[in-house]
Amino acid sequence: MNVLERLGTGTQLAGSLLLAVAASRFLYVAVSEGWSDDQAPPKPAPSAQVSAVAQGSGPAKPKGQAIRTKLLVSVGADRSTVRVDGATLGKTPLFTETSCRLGEPLQVLVIEPSGKTLTFAPTCVEGTVRVEP
């Protein structure tokens, strides 16, 4: 074997090794993501409840003060449009941040792909406002 043949064989071996490593990485990610889907929370029921959980510590803010709070919406069909006080914030399941006035209700509309609209009015609190089953 001359030098060029050895170099060609070495290049083929390196390429095969790289392909095997990449394929194993894809296999690992596919399997681990498949397992995390099995542990996903169950689909929400049609009769959803609204809960607001305050998670702040420190001095209490006066009612009506404008604050930034987290919003979790997990009701309705997957990929339903979420509108809060007239503004479209995203699709379900949604975890985002929004502004509101402390102690006042938010108008949350969940518009499913079928056209069905679910309406909720959770109270604005510090921490996380939850709209879930």
Image: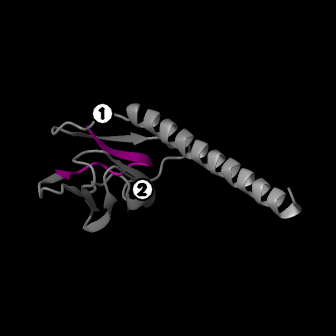
Q: Residues within 10 Å of mark 2 (few under 14, many from 20)?
A: few
Give residue 20's position: percent from left, percent from top. Answer: 63, 45
Give me the C-alpha separation between circle 1 and circle 2.
20 Å
Residue drawn 44% across and 54% down?
69
Left or right of residue 9, residue 22 in this image: left
User: Residue type at mark 1?
Assistant: Pro
Label placed on residue 69:
none
Q: Which mark is residue 42?
A: 1
Give the secondary structure at mark 2: strand
Q: Quadrant of residue 112?
A: bottom left
Q: Position of residue 109 (x, y in %)?
A: 21, 57
Q: Secondary structure at mark 1?
A: loop
Circle 2 residue: 96
Which quadrant would residue 47 be assigned to in this image? top left
Do the residues bearing badges 1 and 2 touch, measured as CB atoms within 8 Å? no
Vertical position of residue 130 compared to residue 94: above or below = above
> Which stretch did the figure color magenta?
119-133
What amino acid does circle 2 point to?
Thr
Residue at 58% from the left image edge and 46% from the top image edge: 23
Is 124 one of the magenta-colored residues?
yes
Residue at image location 60% in from the left, 45% down from the top: 25
If the image is split into quadrants, where does the N terminus sit? bottom right
Pick whichever, 43 or 16, lies toward us: 16
